[in-house]
Amino acid sequence: MIRTDVLILGGGLSGLSTAYHLGERAGRSCLVVDKSPVIGGTAGSVRREGFVFDHTGHLLHLHDPYGKRLVATLLRGNLAWLARSSWIHSQGVDTRYPFQANTFGLPAAVVEECVAGFLKTVHWPAPPATGSFRDWCLAQFGEGISRRFMFPYNEKVWRRSLREITTDWQGPFVPKPAAGEVIRGALMDQAQAFGYNAAFSYPIRGGIQSLPESLARSLAGGRLRLGARVASVDLAARVAVVEGVGEVGFGRLVNTMPLPHFLDLARPLPAGVLEARRNLRHNSVYCLNIGIARPRVSDKHWIYFPEKGFAFYRAGFLSNFSRHVAPAGASSMYIEAARRPSEKVELPRLERLFLEGLRACGILRRSDRIVARHWAPIEYGYVVYDRDRTAALKTVFAFLRKAKVESIGRYGAWKYSFMEEALLDGKRCAERLSSGGRSRAQGLARGA
């Protein structure tokens, strides 16, 4: 049996960030294990036919001062800063994102419906009838905006009635404009930026894979083991069985794997935790990456598709993030659809529907030649924020605290978040685990 002070399950951003911030100076040994032969988890990339494809769109939305310094330090000049160009395709036209502030260009009757409904929420506000996301949308944006975008788009993502979805997830992700901004956005093409992702960063070379690789370079001396699937975790004996490694004794455990999957591997679990685990639900994301033998198939970064006539909810243009992810004279795209885990998915059929939709809206031409394809199914794509989630997490995390287990990151903490938050989750976890040693975070904060 090998022993380590801190065992980290998962080599994605939050797990790597924890190990990075612990550092060798923190006075604790640590070991990161991941089942994949490649580092990065879902924040990874693959190479196909000269293209670099990510596991769906991964953009760096950097707001925290430390997060900005950390990413700049890790990527060392391999970082582009971009102003978002995101759009919505509905009623046969493209309008700027967010929909609620940009109805200019839609049919006049649709614009009138959306603006009138929004102004009603301003002058005759009414609280949501329930705590559902559906009723929150009606109270915030009115009937028109909700019916034309909020309802159909979010039903595509969540794959269930919005009456079942709570408002716990949206935070900064669903901005509400002022009345004047809604009116201006109905009368003219306003380029004002809204929301948390108005600007973003992306590696110049190597795709998003370059970020976890930069973190992993700090893990020398066998502190990272790939192709090492966790078979079981005994929380009482403080021993994990890891394929290719054997038994690993640990003092503290950091989980970044999807929380339900971790609970399935862990023992012993009280009956209440087992019951709570059954109330943790998710959707899967099916992402198709394609390479097209035509330059600049679009001038946009990504487009949302709320209407049912399109099998996907979003399409993005990776080669507009960086020209180095596609060969000269070519473009690359990612197209996304969500499904419940219980839904049967036939990838050839879904690919056909994707390509038909892209041709129908004019992004692809009939003459376009697809020179590369890569499916990137993500089993745990979105955590479902239904009415059972909060109580279930309260039970699970109360138990994990007593068991001295940290469960962090988008999937370990079972939340909706972005990449900077995953990096900061790792930093904060390392600080909690540190025994008073000077961590990398302290060094970076002081300019060391």
Image (cartoon, grey):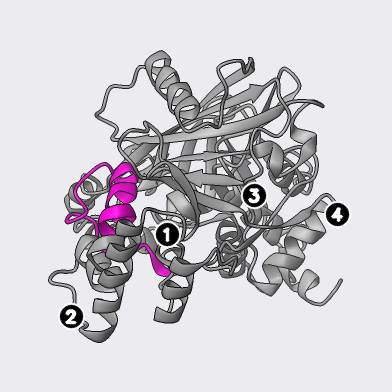
Q: Depth check: 241 or 103 in front?
A: 103
In the rendered structure, which amino acid carries the disc numbered 4?
Arg
| Among the two numbered marks 4 and 3 on one chain, the one whose residue lies closer to the N terminus | 3
| Residue beneath disc 4 | 76
| Among the two numbered marks 2 and 1 on one chain, the one whose residue lies closer to the N terminus | 1
Q: Residues within 10 Å of mark 2 (few under 14, many from 20)?
A: few
| Among the two numbered marks 4 and 1 on one chain, the one whose residue lies closer to the N terminus | 4
In the rendered structure, which amino acid carries the disc numbered 2?
Ala
Residue 52 versus residue 26 in the image, above or below: above
Secondary structure found at label 2: loop
Secondary structure found at label 4: loop
- Image coords of residue 84 (percent x, y): 63, 57
The residue mark sitting in front, 4 or 3, is 4
Residue 279 versus residue 73 in the image, above or below: above
| Residue beneath disc 3 | 16
Which residue is drawn at the image coordinates 23% and 67% (left, top)? 138
State the quadrant of the C terminus. bottom right
Instruction: Say whether residue 52 is magenta.
Output: no
Which residue is drawn at the image coordinates 78% and 41% (left, top)? 221
| Among the two numbered marks 4 and 2 on one chain, the one whose residue lies closer to the N terminus | 4
Q: Depth check: 429 or 13 in front?
A: 13
| Among the two numbered marks 3 and 2 on one chain, the one whose residue lies closer to the N terminus | 3
- Image coords of residue 194 (percent x, y): 53, 68
Q: Is residue 382 left or right of residue 438?
A: left
Q: Residues within 10 Å of mark 4 (few under 14, many from 20)?
A: few
The residue mark sitting in front, 1 or 3, is 1
Q: Magenta residues? A: 146-171
Q: Residues within 10 Å of mark 3 (few under 14, many from 20)?
A: many
Q: Residues within 10 Å of mark 1 (few under 14, many from 20)?
A: many
Which residue is drawn at the image coordinates 86% and 54% (left, top)? 77
Q: Depth check: 348 or 397 in front?
A: 348
- Image coords of residue 200 (percent x, y): 66, 58
